[in-house]
């Protein structure tokens, strides 16, 4: 498999982990396989949250499994990927929808993924993202 399709698969797998539409169970073990345990960043205006992979997973797993967030799905709608030898960066525009605490929502946002190729497999080493502001 060439690098671009391999990266496409890793990113599609990343987005798929968080889906719980129609009672689907999120596969957080898949996330642990495709990501390094390094740092993850989320920007909210001028505030930035920094976490390890496990710190990133825990609150999302709780929301997706305890009924706070149901029928949730997030998917990529546009991407630009730059590959240089064993490094890659992916700019991703995404949409997400679901029901949060009984309220339906639809949102968009932007993510930057950094990846590294280790022993012929691409791994996500960092993610930064920001949801678009809703009016």
Image (cartoon, rainbow, N blue to C red):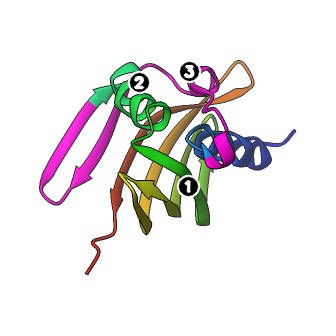
Q: Which residue is mark 2?
A: 53
Direction front: furthest residue: 102
- The tag on residue 22 is none
Q: Could you say where residue 125 lies in the image, as x and y percent from the top left? A: 47, 31
| Distance between mark 1 and mark 2 Cα atoms | 18 Å
Q: Could you say where residue 30 lies in the image, as x and y percent from the top left? A: 64, 25
Direction right: furthest residue: 1
Query: Within 10 angstroms of label 3, few (less than 14), some, or many (20 or more) residues?
Result: some
Label 2: element kind: helix
| Distance between mark 3 and mark 1 Cα atoms | 18 Å
Q: Could you say where residue 2 lies in the image, as x and y percent from the top left? A: 83, 43
134 sits to left or right of 64? left
Label 3: element kind: helix
The reply to whether callout 2 and callout 3 are in contact (CB within 8 Å) is yes
Q: Residue at x 29, y 46 (%)?
A: 42
134 sits to left or right of 119? left
Residue stretch in magenta: 21-50
Quarter in which the C terminus is drawn: bottom left
Query: Within 10 angstroms of label 1, few (less than 14), some, or many (20 or more) residues?
Result: many
User: Against 77, is 82 above or below?
Assistant: above
- Of circles 1 and 2, the one toward us is 1
Q: Residue at x 30, y 40 (%)?
A: 41
Query: Within 10 angstroms of label 2, few (less than 14), some, or many (20 or more) residues?
Result: some
Q: Which residue is mark 1?
A: 74
Direction bottom: furthest residue: 135
Q: Which residue is mark 3?
A: 32
């Amino acid at each position: 498999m060439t690098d671009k399709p391999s990266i496409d698969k890793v990113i599609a797998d990343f987005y798929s982990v968080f889906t719980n539409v129609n009672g689907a169970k999120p596969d957080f073990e898949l996330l642990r396989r495709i990501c390094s345990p390094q740092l993850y960043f989320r920007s909210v205006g001028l505030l930035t949250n920094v976490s390890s992979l496990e710190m990133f997973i825990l609150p999302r797993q709780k929301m997706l499994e305890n009924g706070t967030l149901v029928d949730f799905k997030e998917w990529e709608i546009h991407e630009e990927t730059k590959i240089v030898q064993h490094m890659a960066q992916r700019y991703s525009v995404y949409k997400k929808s679901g029901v949060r605490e009984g309220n339906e929502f639809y949102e968009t946002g932007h993510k930057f993924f950094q990846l590294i190729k280790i022993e012929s497999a691409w791994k996500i080493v960092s993610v930064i993202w920001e949801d678009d502001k809703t009016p």
